[in-house]
Image (cartoon, helix red, strand yellow):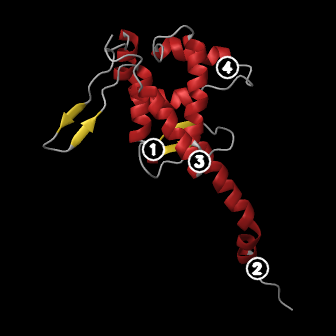
Amino acid sequence: MQNQMSSKNTAALLEWGPRKILGDLANVPGKDDPNWVTAVQKFVSTYGVLRPSQDPEMEVLEYARRFREIWTAKTEEEFQRANGFLEEIFIAPDSFSAVPPITDFRTGRWEPRPRTLLERLAIELMRSRKMLYQCERAECQKYFVKVWSRDRYCSNPCGEKGRASSLERYHAKHREKRNATRRKPVRR
């Protein structure tokens, strides 16, 4: 029972990587969205279950909500709640299923070994905590993990649309001033 990651989990991590899967989990909508069932089913069919459970789809829904809360944490209380939530993920149900971490005293490294996809995503959340972002395009607002620190949009199409609309806003704001410099001066 040491490693409970399915072959689907492993294949998904190899194909898409934990950052994309983490972003997709955070973007699973809540129950107030009419498309939540489809989104949850798509997540499970694409990446597999987060961990073995009685109701894997409801678990995806709940962890999506919790990961979004961590993503948008700003206050000390929210950070403390996030810490408790992340610690809960790694608690083993029994001492036999606990996987010892990878320890390298020479380099001073300590790395937890994930048993499930959920634990792998929690590790990625911690590693990428400074790169968690929400798309700046008003129509999108998707959660994503930045590749570069200056990323502002979740994808190239969003970036192109976002830059085009900000350019339009800039030109609208400065149009009169620009046109005034182009007009002939009035002679009296």
Type of amino acid at the residue the image marks with label 3 = Glu
Look at mark 3 in the image and give the residue it sits on: 77
The circle drawn on residue 36 is 4
Sort mark 2 into few (<14), some (14-19) or many (20+) by Cα contacts within 10 Å: few
Spatial separation of the CA atoms under disc 3 and disc 1: 17 Å
SS under mark 1: helix
Type of amino acid at the residue the image marks with label 4 = Trp
Spatial separation of the CA atoms under disc 1 and disc 4: 26 Å
Direction bottom: furthest residue: 188
Point out the image quarter for the C terminus: bottom right
Dot in front, 3 or 1: 3
Look at mark 2 in the image and give the residue it sits on: 184
Spatial separation of the CA atoms under disc 3 and disc 2: 61 Å
Q: Residue 110, percent across and down? A: 25, 38
Dot in front, 3 or 2: 3
Direction right: furthest residue: 188
